[in-house]
Amino acid sequence: MRLPPAILANTEEVLREILRFTAPADVTLSRYFKDHPRLGGRERGAVAEGVYAVLRNKSFFTDFAGSGNAPTIRRLALLGMAEAVGAESLGGLSEEENQFLARVTQIDRKLLSPLLRSNLPQWLYDKLVAQFGEQETLELAAVLNTPAPLDLRVNSIKANRDDVIAELATAPIIAEPMPYAPLGLRVHKKPALQNLPLFKSGAIEVQDEGSQVLAQLVGARRGEMVVDFCAGAGGKTLALGAIMRNTGRLYAFDVSEKRLAKLKPRLARSGLSNVHPVVIAHERDAKVKRLAGKIDRVLVDAPCSGLGTLRRNPDVKWRQQPQAIAEMQEKQLSILDGASRLVKSGGRLVYATCSLLNEENDAVVEQFLATHDDFALVPMSAALAEQKIPLEMDKYLKLLPHKHNTDGFFAAVLERKPMAAKPAKAQAETEE
């Protein structure tokens, strides 16, 4: 069934706005759909998929869309829609446009230059090649330029995984257990979930498998005091609350009241009562200082470039700038330092990002350890074994889309060294 010709015009219109890169693509799309309420679900889906196809393949498409007499944006929209829904679904094309699409779709992309094939900006391509080598960078880029799967986390407070699989099957939605996250399900295709009883009741949440693994790595236990230091909309907070079996006290800190507000409806659905959202001004806030040395586990899912999420947010590679990485690293170190003060003797601090770059990952942890001799690195192999997560890692967790089919994630587990007990004589002298 062909799409109405107007859909291509809609795609062209919203694409022109998105390619200015003044706001995240999903925000611009959402606003556009609100302003165009006559677009149905199928049409909205096609426009969104066409736009994301352009963002994923921008280098390659731009190289060919610029030739000829047709406006570049129109040709980009054509290529994006053809990639997303198939050229045969597009109605109202001119003969020249049909010929243009036929010409471009016949190109063997394997014959393109490595940079053009990667569909990455030059600076990012160079950084990844320096880190992974050219061959692995191309393998990584190929997967980053495909849509991410739909992952769910079963809320163990309300349901178990087998029952959820059976209930989804009646929808009918096929879901399979994930290899690494014990409560994770991967859904085939991308069905609408919002109206499902399972979703409304809080039995399931949408969450990437890598994000679920991070929450598991914190190792939170019943009755503990735990802090999610950069909670955002609270995906990992909710996972932590369930792992703690709704006991103890779990603080969700964030500097953005708007982001934390998104946690409230999810929290209401979850059935958790041990979560306490707290807006903080910065990492040195008095609300943070009051908890210094009292917390068993702290998760710092730090603000980062977000380059590990390119399957979901392909515009990030074009919006992100190389000079921002150095500024980000400074911010990450400051947040990690502030959060570390919360950790009690023998407690754990987990530093994580959804970045692929060493500057935001290994380098930050190594700088932190160089100036905090009261913390020691827990080898990731040991932390994964504790949680029975079947992943092979060395010092750090490094999840990669082309190897693990998750978003790109990094994590390090740090433990505050237990304070040595003072000898009895020295203790008595101190008390006197």
Image (spheres, grey):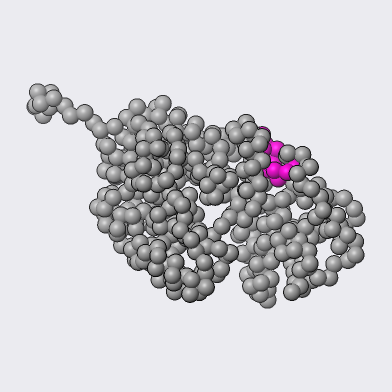
- Within the image, what quadrant is residue 34 found in? bottom right
Q: Is residue 58 above or below residue 346?
A: below
Q: Position of residue 215 (x, y in %)?
A: 40, 50
- The structure residue drawn at horizontal position 56% and vertical position 40%, both measured from the top left corner, is 356
Count numbered badges in the picture. Answer: 0
Q: Is residue 286 visible?
A: no
Magenta-drawn stretch, dominant element (helix, strand or loop): helix
Q: Is residue 110 visible?
A: yes
- The structure residue drawn at horizontal position 33% and vertical position 36%, both measured from the top left corner, is 415
The one nearer the camera, 276 or 374, is: 374
Q: Residue 124: within the magenta?
A: yes
- Within the image, what quadrant is residue 163 found in? bottom left
Residue range highlighted in magenta: 116-127
> Where, quadrant-wise, is the C terminus in this rendering?
top left
- The structure residue drawn at horizontal position 44% and vertical position 66%, both measured from the top left corner, is 165
Q: Position of residue 287 (x, y in %)?
A: 33, 47
> Where, quadrant-wise, is the N terminus in this rendering?
bottom right
Q: Residue 380: within the magenta?
A: no
Q: Position of residue 201 (x, y in %)?
A: 40, 71
Q: Position of residue 209 (x, y in %)?
A: 48, 53
Left/right placement of residue 246 relative to residue 302 reads: left
The one nearer the camera, 273 or 288, is: 273
- The structure residue drawn at horizontal position 64% and vertical position 38%, both measured from the top left corner, is 137
- Within the image, what quadrant is residue 98 found in? bottom right
